[in-house]
């Protein structure tokens, strides 16, 4: 309950956003590339945005990974996939961004949380 209250308090009126990526940018979770000319550096999150919203989302991600089997499997997939595995913190940020999309959908359409739909939307490559 504290997570939802913190999310709504920091975001405000959800109808002013057209896309969940706008909330992601508001939180400072937008991906920034570090490159110039021929130099190709690592990408990272921008950290430009609301620090408290980032904190609420990070804490929510840690909580759902430890308590929800669906989000635990998503986190496990991100950290153990063969191509481009993420580090633990990167995976938690990806889960936090997934939470933004879930919150956005629930608050915009007044839908209920459906774990089967959450897992069904994920397309993972099939091992050949």
Image: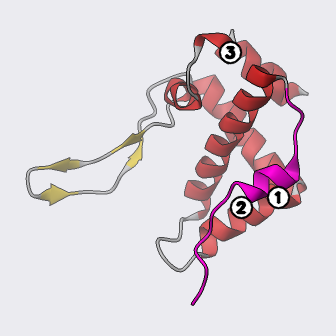
Which mark is first along the chain, 2 or 3? 3
Residue 117, magenta (yes or no): yes
Snapshot colouring? secondary structure
Q: Circle 3 is placed at which residue position?
A: 14
The span from disc 3 to disc 2 (Cα, nearest Å) is 25 Å
Q: Secondary structure at mark 3?
A: helix
> What residue is at 64 percent from the left and 26 percent from the top?
53
Name the image quarter holding the C terminus.
bottom right
The picture quadrant where one finds residue 48 is top left
Q: Secondary structure at mark 2?
A: helix
Q: Which stretch appears magenta?
A: 111-128
Labelled pair 1, 2 in contact (Cβ < 8 Å):
yes
> What residue is at 68 percent from the left and 15 percent from the top?
14
Q: Circle 1 is placed at which residue position?
A: 70
Residue 62, magenta (yes or no): no
The span from disc 1 to disc 2 (Cα, nearest Å) is 6 Å
Q: Circle 2 is placed at which residue position?
A: 74
Q: Secondary structure at mark 1?
A: helix
Percent coordinates x, y for residue 6 in the rendering? 77, 21
Mark 2 surroundings: few (<14), some (14-19) or many (≥20) residues within 10 A: some
The picture quadrant where one finds residue 100 is top right
């Amino acid at each position: 309950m504290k997570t939802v209250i913190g999310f709504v308090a920091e975001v405000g009126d959800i109808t002013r956003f057209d896309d969940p990526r706008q909330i992601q940018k508001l939180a400072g979770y937008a991906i920034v590339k570090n490159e110039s000319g021929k130099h190709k550096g690592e990408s990272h999150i921008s950290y430009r945005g609301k620090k408290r919203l980032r904190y609420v989302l990070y804490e929510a991600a840690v909580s759902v990974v430890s308590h929800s089997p669906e989000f635990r499997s998503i986190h496990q997939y991100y950290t153990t996939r063969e191509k481009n595995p993420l580090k633990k913190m990167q995976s938690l940020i990806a889960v936090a961004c997934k939470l933004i999309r879930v919150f956005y959908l629930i608050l915009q359409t007044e839908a209920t949380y459906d774990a089967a739909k959450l897992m069904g939307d994920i397309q993972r490559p099939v091992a050949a």
